[in-house]
Image (cartoon, rainbow, N blue to C red):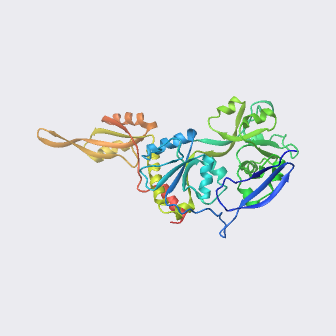
């Protein structure tokens, strides 16, 4: 006789605020279901530590981890590890500050549990493991890397050969209550499970957590009534070929893996767009000393650097009778307006013993994609000695996202 296994859900959350709801036996599988206890204000009881240091969680491995370290370095926030095997590091520019390397999903979990104050991870991880918590605040939603999408994909062959759009998939007559569209996914959104504490054994007996995924909501909104979802870890691309699913809902980057497995994305079938984000615990921002100030500095550096990315400073000399006359010529060209307008100043030189300003120096910021066009237009209106320099930072009077954050915190 097989030994019954015990699966304790959400035991990875390091918090005492879990209370067993029920224990159910399904054949030889015993499942103990836990749910977060709720405080009187409706929020989950998160452990509030008495530590004084601010903690930032970063991805420990992979491309996401490497790109995160590169971005911080470009913002003059290099992470220093005394030993590459250690999971704790520092950023010397930030006082009373620790970096903790974690798996992307564990960054979200530890933000919820109060073990981290800030984290950089994928928006897909925040959506999947954040459980819809109001304690999680996206501080910066577009760090510019780690792009992927949660997308619906179907086989290129068989009855799907001429099916390319979500509308065409929905309108296929094959899908009925007795024979629904079967979608395999590894992306599970579990807030409903915690909220309603439904006996999970029922759903596992069907091999699905369909009521708890993002997929069903998306399908319902797009008119597909007859659909079931099954959960799987890894190798989702094999599910249609094995006959255990009609479609898959998975994270897609370049799409190469889908093509290599004879699958295609469904046009209009993107459930979620994702990239790296800076996320924070609302409780930490309002309760932990120094966390808000540190968040402000990190956000300012990130915004200033990302705004300057792919921007160049263009400096040139131009003959003119006055600053206003030069400005008129500059603003007559579509690519020479800069961020708020060109900066124009006289260039003084000495001729025949007299100091005069026959030239004017102009300075503008130009996007990389418009750089050559801008140089051409400058030459056309009399510009010479054109110098090009890459930009590192563009600081606004105040960070727009900082204003948004303060508003969300009620500050």
Q: Which one is nearer the viewer's eye here, 254 or 100? A: 100
Of residues 214 and 332, the one drawn nearer to the viewer in this rendering = 214
Q: Farthest residue toward the left? A: 353
Q: How many marks?
A: 0
Residue at the spot x=40%, y=37% of the render?
Answer: 374
Residue 396 is left or right of residue 192, and the answer is left
Q: Nearer the viewer, residue 199 or 9?
A: 9
Residue 297 percent location from the top left of the image: 44, 54
The residue shown at (73%, 50%) is 213
In x, y percent, where is residue 100?
54, 49
**Residue 142: x, y in percent?**
54, 47
Quadrant (top left/top right/bottom left/bottom right) for the N terminus: top right
- Name the residue rendered at 71%, 38% in the picture: 234
Left or right of residue 103: residue 182: right
Q: Nearer the viewer, residue 28 or 142?
A: 28
273 vs 404, left or right, is: right
In the picture shown, does residue 390 fall above or below 290? above
The percent coordinates of residue 396 (x first, y second) are 42, 53
Can you name the residue that lies furthest to the bottom here?
Answer: 40
């Amino acid at each position: 006789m097989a030994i019954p296994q015990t699966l304790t859900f959400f035991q990875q959350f390091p918090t005492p605020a879990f209370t067993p709801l029920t224990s159910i036996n399904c054949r030889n599988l015993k499942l103990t279901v836990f749910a977060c206890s709720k405080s009187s204000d409706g929020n989950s009881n998160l452990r509030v530590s008495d530590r004084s240091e601010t903690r930032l969680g970063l991805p420990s491995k992979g491309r996401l981890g490497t790109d995160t370290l590169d971005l911080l370095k470009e913002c003059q926030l290099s992470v220093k590890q005394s030993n590459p095997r250690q999971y704790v590091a520092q950023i010397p520019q930030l006082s009373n500050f620790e970096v903790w390397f974690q798996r992307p999903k564990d960054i979200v979990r530890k933000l919820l549990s109060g073990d981290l104050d800030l984290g950089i991870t994928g928006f897909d991880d925040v959506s999947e493991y954040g459980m819809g918590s109001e304690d999680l605040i996206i501080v910066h939603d577009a760090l510019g890397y780690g792009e992927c999408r949660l997308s619906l994909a179907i086989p290129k062959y068989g009855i799907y050969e001429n099916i390319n759009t979500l509308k065409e998939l929905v309108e296929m007559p094959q899908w009925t209550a007795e024979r629904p569209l079967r979608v395999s996914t590894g992306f599970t959104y579990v807030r409903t499970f915690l909220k309603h504490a439904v006996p999970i054994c029922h759903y596992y007996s069907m091999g699905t957590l369909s009521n708890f995924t993002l997929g069903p909501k998306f399908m319902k909104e797009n008119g597909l009534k007859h659909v079931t979802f099954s959960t799987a870890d890894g190798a989702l691309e094999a599910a249609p070929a094995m006959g255990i699913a009609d479609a898959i809902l998975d994270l897609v980057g370049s799409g190469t893996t889908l093509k290599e497995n004879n699958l295609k994305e469904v046009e209009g079938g993107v459930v979620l767009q994702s990239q790296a984000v800076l996320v924070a615990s609302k409780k930490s921002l309002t309760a932990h000393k120094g966390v808000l100030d540190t968040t402000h500095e990190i956000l300012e550096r990130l915004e200033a650097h990302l705004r300057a990315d792919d921007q160049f400073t263009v400096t040139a000399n131009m003959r003119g009778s006055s600053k206003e006359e030069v400005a008129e010529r500059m603003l007559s060209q579509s690519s020479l307006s800069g961020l708020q307008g060109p900066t124009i100043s006289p260039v003084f030189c000495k001729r025949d013993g007299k100091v005069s300003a026959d030239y004017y120096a102009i300075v503008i910021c130009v996007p990389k994609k418009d750089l050559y066009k801008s140089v051409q237009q400058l030459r056309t209106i009399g510009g010479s000695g054109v110098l090009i320099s890459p930009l590192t930072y563009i600081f606004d009077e105040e960070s727009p996202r900082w204003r948004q954050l303060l508003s969300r915190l009620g500050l």
